[in-house]
Structures are given as structure tokens and as C-alpha cells.
Amino acid sequence: EREWMDRVRALGCVACEKDGNPEVLAEIHHIVSGNRRIGHLFTLPLCPNHHRLGSIKMPAIHPWRARFEAKYGTQLELLAALKKRLGVFDEARYEA
């Protein structure tokens, strides 16, 4: 789990990358379901602005999750893309 989070953090913020600003320093965001973290392997790299600070123009996942996901995709979509990029994608976990 620690290795995964280190690899993810090193990639930089996934939202900034979608905005055309790759390799912005990131912190770890844990994906939650039912108000509970679903594990350290379900994490995304987000800069402080996209994670918790944000603004109207740069929505943070906390507290504007719906606005963030409308702009960048759902957390599970971002995670699936991240796992593909790192070569650890497991399609069965993301089937509808």
C-alpha cells in the first residue's frame, strides 16, 4: 500500500494534468464510499487546491465533489485511468 501511494503521489495531480499542467506536486486523496475510506489502494494524487482548498474555477473534491467530478470525471474513472497508466489495471473491478 505504501509503495502504491508513493508511486501515485510521484505522478502529480491528476486534475492539474487534465488542465494541461502536468507534474504538479500532489497529496493523497482516499476515495470513500458510504463515508468510509475504501482502502489505501483506492487513492488519487491531487494537489492541495484540487484536494481541499479549491475555488469556483478550480473545484476541490472536498467540499465540491459533484463539481469536481463533472469537470474531471468520477473518482473511479480517474483511478482506472491511473491504474492503466501504471500498468496495474484490473478490468473486473470496474465493470458495471
Image: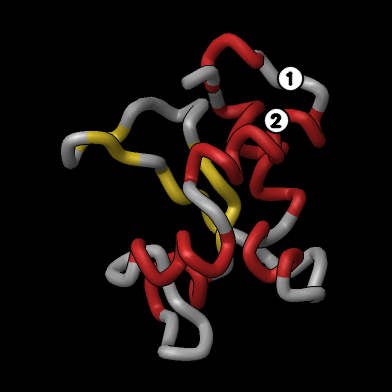
What quarter of the picture does the N terminus occupy?
top right
Image height of 65 relative to 43, above or below: below
Location of residue 47 (image quadrant): bottom right
Q: State the mark number for residue 58.
A: none
Secondary structure under the numbered disc 2 in the rendered image:
helix
Residue 14: name its quadrant.
bottom right
Residue type highlighted by circle 2: Lys
Q: Do the numbered discs 1 and 2 sit on residues whose CB atoms are within 8 Å?
A: yes
Seen at 40% across and 64% down, the residue is 61
Taking the view exactly as shown, the residue that stands out farthest to the bottom is 56
- How many other residues sit within 10 Å of disc 2, few (<14), some (14-19) or many (≥20)? some
Helix, strand or loop under label 1: loop
Q: Residue at x 79, y 75 (%)?
A: 21
**46 w.r.t. 84: above or below:** below
Q: Position of residue 23 (x, y in %)?
A: 80, 64
Q: Which mark is residue 83?
A: 2
Q: Residue at x 40, y 79 (%)?
A: 53
Badge 1 is on which residue? 88
Along the viewing direction, whichever of 68 and 3 lies nearer the viewer:
68
Q: Position of residue 64 (x, y in %)?
A: 33, 71
> Would you say 84 lies left or right of 93 here?
right
Q: Residue furthest top?
A: 92
- Calculate the distance from the C-alpha at mark 1 to the C-alpha at mark 2: 5 Å
Q: Residue 76 vs residue 52: left or right?
A: right
| Residue 71 located left or right of residue 21 | left
Residue 43, given in percent of the width and then of the height, sits at 50, 39
